[in-house]
Image: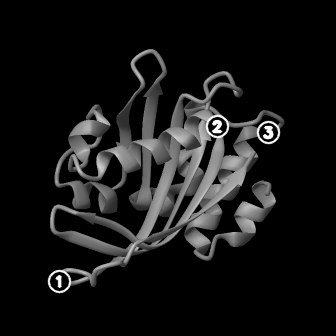
Amino acid sequence: MSFEDFARAIASPELKHIAQHWDERRGLREMPSWDDIRPSQIAAQLPYLWVYKYDRATDTFTGRLAGDRIEHVFAKSFRGTPMTELYPPKDYPRLFARTKRVACEPALFLGRGMVFSHVDHFGQGERIMMPLADDGVLGDGVLGATLYDSVGGIPAAGQSEDESWFSL
């Protein structure tokens, strides 16, 4: 599957706009760099945006940026925070593996359903993740966005995020 398949599969106009911006900014390269992204062109979607920087030498992700709706979920600053400090230990291995696959394969990710359950916050919606690369080839970051509606109470057991993967 290709970027075009990924873009067609996205239901949310807001997330589709971010994906189209990512595609436009990469030009003829496999993926854009963080510096290629133009926040002014996705200003209405910034509250849902989040970005990780990936360090291959240490095999770690560090938060680079998160919009208001995302920081609200974490109840702490995302910027400069290691991914290990953002998620509960039980969730971290799965989330790290998924994020690393996006950055290193590289791949495009689309999730739907229960997109987060964190610090007594629960959200139903849609999420996208796309790789970033300073050199346009070797993934060193992830640009993501999560559009969600808060869900009151504790969700029913078995509710999860349905994952779809797309190759570049």
Label 3 crowd bin: few (<14), some (14–19), many (20+), radius 10 Å: few
Residue furthest out toward the top: 57
Residue drawn 56% across and 37% down?
103
Q: Secondary structure at mark 2?
A: loop
Q: Residue 15 at what x, y percent from top left?
A: 57, 65
Q: How many marks?
A: 3
**Depth-wise, is mark 3 or mark 1 nearer the camera?**
1
Label 2 crowd bin: few (<14), some (14–19), many (20+), radius 10 Å: few
Work out which quarter of the rendered image holds the N terminus and state it: bottom right
Q: Residue 102 at what x, y percent from top left?
A: 57, 43
Residue picked out by circle 3: 27
Q: Residue 150 at what x, y percent from top left?
A: 29, 78
Gap between marks 2 and 3, in whole Å? Answer: 19 Å
Residue picked out by circle 1: 153
Which label's residue is closer to the chain start, 1 or 2? 2
Q: Residue 16 at what x, y percent from top left?
A: 64, 66
Left or right of residue 61, residue 142 in this image: right
Which label's residue is closer to the chain start, 2 or 3? 3
Q: Amino acid at mark 1?
A: Gly
Which label's residue is closer to the chain start, 3 or 1? 3
Of residue 114 and residue 141, the one placed in the foreground of this image is 114
Color style of the picture: one colour
Of residue 31 and residue 55, the one placed in the foreground of this image is 55
**Depth-wise, is mark 1 or mark 2 nearer the camera?**
2
> Which dot marks residue 105?
2
Q: Amino acid at mark 3?
A: Gly
Left or right of residue 161, residue 5 in this image: right
Q: Amino acid at mark 2?
A: Glu
